[in-house]
Amino acid sequence: MSGVVLEALPFALGGAVSPALLALSMLIMASPDRGRLKGLCYFLGTLVFSVLFVVVIHLFLHSLGMTRPDRAKLQTEAIIDIVIGTLLVLWAIVRVLRGTPPPKTKQEDRARSPMGLSAAFGAGFVMMALNFSTLPLYTLAVRAVDKSALS
């Protein structure tokens, strides 16, 4: 059990600490009207997506036969490692080549509308779904737990 925790914990912590999600959650909670409640709805949105994502990845890995201890399992694990590694490298290259976005004008900042509770939940769900820096880490954590005897 401790081996699984030691293998999955860095991925889980890396996925949990995302600057984009933390910044948006601070902005939502700093709103003057019902900031805590909106923050809770935002958290629930990210939590619902995270749970759905873990379940889908778990089912996908089991459908690939990751529970069988044979050569095909090792090949499948190697392919998953290569695909995730390639996607992370490509994502990093795109981020470096794209650079920083231009600053917003004051008029664009004023055009925002107040966010309701359902919009905060949706923002959490969508931000987690589009947060490509943490999803591969969650995938690797699920894979680490799946290949252990705990699953």
Image: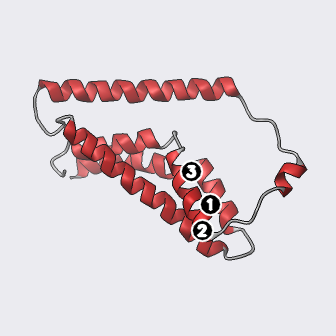
**What residue is disc 2 on?**
39
**Secondary-structure class at tag 2:** helix
Q: Nearest to the eye among marks 3 and 1: give it.
A: 3
Q: Identify which residue is drawn at 44% across, 23% down.
A: 86
Separation of marks 2 and 3 at Cα, in angstroms: 13 Å
Picture residue at 82% right of the left edge, 41% below the top: 103
Pointer 3: residues within 10 angstroms few (<14), some, or many (20+)?
some
Residue linked to disc 3 = 127
Find residue 115 and report its horizontal and vertical position in percent: 69, 65
Q: Is residue 32 left or right of residue 42?
A: right
Circle nearer the N terminus (3, 1): 1
**Vertically, is 34 above or below 147?**
below
Q: Locate residue 122, reporting x and y percent.
A: 56, 59
Question: For residue 25, which numbered disc appears in the image?
Answer: 1
- The amino acid type found where label 1 is placed reads Ser
Residue 103 in the image: above or below residue 79: below
**Mark 2 and mark 1 residues within 8 Å of each other at the beta carbon:** yes
Q: Is residue 14 left or right of residue 25?
A: left
